[in-house]
Image (cartoon, rainbow, N blue to C red):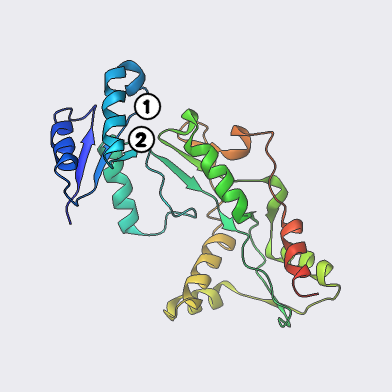
Amino acid sequence: MGEAAVSFDVAPAATIGGAATLIAGATVPTYVLRRPGASAAAPSKEAVVRSLQQKGAVVIERFLPSEFRKRLYEEKRKVRRAVEAAGVPFTYICCNSIAGWPYYEQYDHCEAVRRWRTYFVACCDIGKFAIMAAHDDRTINKTVHFRPPCNFLSMNELATLWENKIGRSLPRIAVSEAALLAAAAENRIPESFVASFTHDVFFKGCQQNFSIDGQQDLEVTELYPGVTFRTMEECFEDFAAGIR
């Protein structure tokens, strides 16, 4: 299935082909890229956008990838570089570790990695701040990192927090770097992915071993200092309530 693309600033003549595709009732989707400030500078273009929308065109304001962790795959990097080269506005979200998977009551031990701390973000906050960033002119063509100080924790600190919630201690099993690398090399899904991520985050410190320059990279708590994050203690309270 083909696609029709319309971009007023890159190729104005393409509007003719895009509109013709819609008027003809073709089944191929038509996309309209509206660049920041373009419609305000030329109100007539905004009228064309509205007309195309009424005929079923999809208006693109900004490219915001749907994966909200780290940059993982070479294929995704290629897409990002192509978007940048084409001049499409973008915002990249690096939310770090997702606080969305509870411990379970049947766990009889905690796996402890004694190295780096990392940042945890509740799923609801990922969505909330991603939407805010997507509509913020300050984040155009920038990467937004989530580093809430309230959720900057090590694996041991997480384990202690969970023990406090369930009211009992769990044996700690120290996981070595060699053990994680061996598990990652086994190529078992999802176990090897988890081992690889854990090594990258807690042994290499990939989420915090670099500085945020405030130019191309922005920190979300500095963008929105008055907006709070859900704490890991609150997340764990919900998890614990589900097994009480």
Nearest the eye: 192 or 62: 62
Q: Nearer the viewer, mark 1 or mark 2?
A: 1
Can the viewer see residue 101? yes
Residue designated by label 1: 36
Query: Does dot 2 land on a helix, a strand or a loop?
Result: loop
Task: Please give the name of the residue rendered at 49% of the width and 34% of the height, measured from the top-left corner.
Answer: 135
Cα distance between the residues tagged 1 and 2: 8 Å
User: Could you tell me if the residues under marks 1 and 2 are in contact, i.e. CB atoms within 8 Å?
Assistant: yes
Q: Residue at label 2?
A: 89
Q: The residue under label 2 is which amino acid type? A: Pro
Picture coordinates of residue 131, whole percent (x, y): 52, 42
Q: Amino acid at mark 1?
A: Pro
Horizontal side, residue 214 vs residue 91: left or right? right
Q: Quadrant of the C terminus?
A: bottom right
Q: Position of residue 134 (x, y in %)?
A: 47, 38
Task: Kindly give the residue lying farthest to the right in the view shown.
Answer: 167
